[in-house]
Structure formats: structure tokens, C-alpha cells
Image (tube, helix red, strand yellow):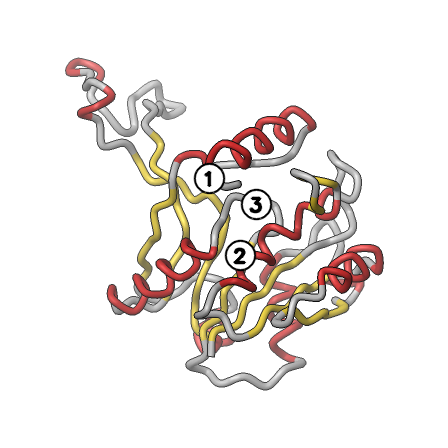
Amino acid sequence: MNIAFVPARCGSKSIRFKNIKEFCSKPLIYWSLLALEKSHLIDAVYVASDCDEILDTVKRFAFKKVHLYKRDKENAQDESSTEDVMLEFLSKHSFKDEDKFLLVQATSPTTTFEDINKALVKLEEDRTDSLLSVVREKKFFWGDDALPINYDFKNRPRRQDFKGVLLENGAFYINSIGNILRDKNRLSGKISFYEMQDYNNIDIDEEIDWAIAEQYMKEYVL
């Protein structure tokens, strides 16, 4: 069984009610849920929120796979980790250890059902314990010691010849429920990755990020 979990907290210091703010004519969280709803490999989707406004909005989507979970207030604070609410949720439900658990970001609207399907298949093909989504970043990074991290400045490569580095984009993570309960972490054991297109590196924290993300969505997804 493949279970998707989408945390959506009320609080957002930068953009008020970000998870349900209109994005390309739909509440932002709609797009991640649509991808999960359309994936034939996902059996159930749980939206975890402390916010009645968010839960009511999600309920109106009438997605068949989506279930609502009212998270505890103590695990919905600024200092609460995503692992806190994951473990809280799993402690109140009975799943098999071998079931797959997909942690999916509500703020990654360009994630498609094809991405979800391909990542689940890749996890099986790679025979790893867990998987995370990444994008390839073709930029030159330097450390605090004024030394380059990922290239030789004496032999600067051309962009088309530069492999770059893989950047965790936070769109989704996959692990087994048994691993999560044992290791208390979204990732554990042998880890593989699913590489997404560079436009999937969206971090919506400010209004300008919102406008850019909408343009990416219209250009590459819709």
C-alpha cells in the first residue's frame, strides 16, 4: 500500500494562509493533491492540518483518495518538525511496516502524477530503502574557507560540460512506514533520488516567489 501524507499548517510568517491562497486559479494545495489523486500507484492521501479553513477547503475538492487528519496543536507550532507530525499521525493509524509512506509538500505545485509514479518505480528498481526528490544545480559553490566546493576554478568548465550538484528540492520523500517508526526520520537506510526538472526548484516564501512559480506552472505544467 502506498500512502501519501501532506502536512499543511495554518501558520505562515511570510504569506498568510499560503497553503490555500489562490495559485493559478486554485488553492495552492490543490495541485499537489491533484497529482496524488491522479497517480494510479497512490492508494490513499492524508492531509494533516491544525487549521479548519484548510481542511474545509480540501474537503470541497471532493477527491476520492483524500482523507483529512486534524493534527495536534502541540505538533503545529513554529518549532515543530515535520517528523513530529508524521510520527503523531502514524501512532494513531494502523499500517503495515512494508507500506510506503510519501511525504509530499503542499508548496510544490509543479509536481505531477508522472513524477510520483516514476519515483515509486525508481525506488523499487534501485532496491533502496528510501528516496528523495532533487534538482540538478549547475552553479559554482564556495565554502567559508574561500575554497571552491564543486569545481576547479583553475579549470573552469563550460556550463554544457558541467555536471553540477544535486539539490534537495523538498517536493517529496518516500520511505517505508517501518523505517520511519524505527529511525524517526523521513529518510533512512540506503537512499536513492529522483531527479526533477530545474523549474521544480520552487521555494515560495515571498510574493515575488509566488509570481515566478505561477509563471513556471503555466509554462511547463498547465
The location of residue 95, given as percent across then percent down, is 54, 84
Q: Of the two numbered discs 1 and 2 on the same chain, state the one appearing first in sequence.
A: 2
CA separation, marks 3 and 2?
9 Å
Residue 170 or residue 39, whichever sits in front:
39
Q: Which residue is mark 2?
A: 35
Q: Which residue is mark 1?
A: 200
Q: Of the two numbered discs 3 and 2 on the same chain, state the one appearing first in sequence.
A: 2
Is mark 3 in CB contact (under 8 Å) with mark 2? no
Graded by Cα atoms within 10 Å as few (under 14), some (14 to 19) or many (20 or more), the crowding at tag 1 reads many
Residue type at numbered disc 1? Asn
Residue 81, image quadrant: bottom right
Graded by Cα atoms within 10 Å as few (under 14), some (14 to 19) or many (20 or more), the crowding at tag 2 reads some
Q: Residue at x 46, y 58 (%)?
A: 173
Decide if residue 163 is on the left or right side of residue 29. Answer: left
Q: How many numbered marks are there?
A: 3
Residue farthest toward the right in the current orientation of the protein = 52
Residue farthest toward the front in the current orientation of the protein = 222
Element assignment for label 2: helix
Residue 139 vertical placement versus 1 (above, below): above
Element assignment for label 3: loop
Decide if residue 42 is on the left or right side of residue 85. Answer: left
Q: Residue at x 49, y 41 (%)?
A: 221
Q: Which residue is mark 3?
A: 109
The location of residue 10, given as percent across then percent down, is 78, 51
Is mark 3 in CB contact (under 8 Å) with mark 1? no
Residue 99 or residue 23, whichever sits in front:
23
Residue 127, image quadrant: bottom left
Residue type at numbered disc 2? Ala
Element assignment for label 1: helix
Q: Of the two numbered discs 3 and 1 on the same chain, state the one appearing first in sequence.
A: 3
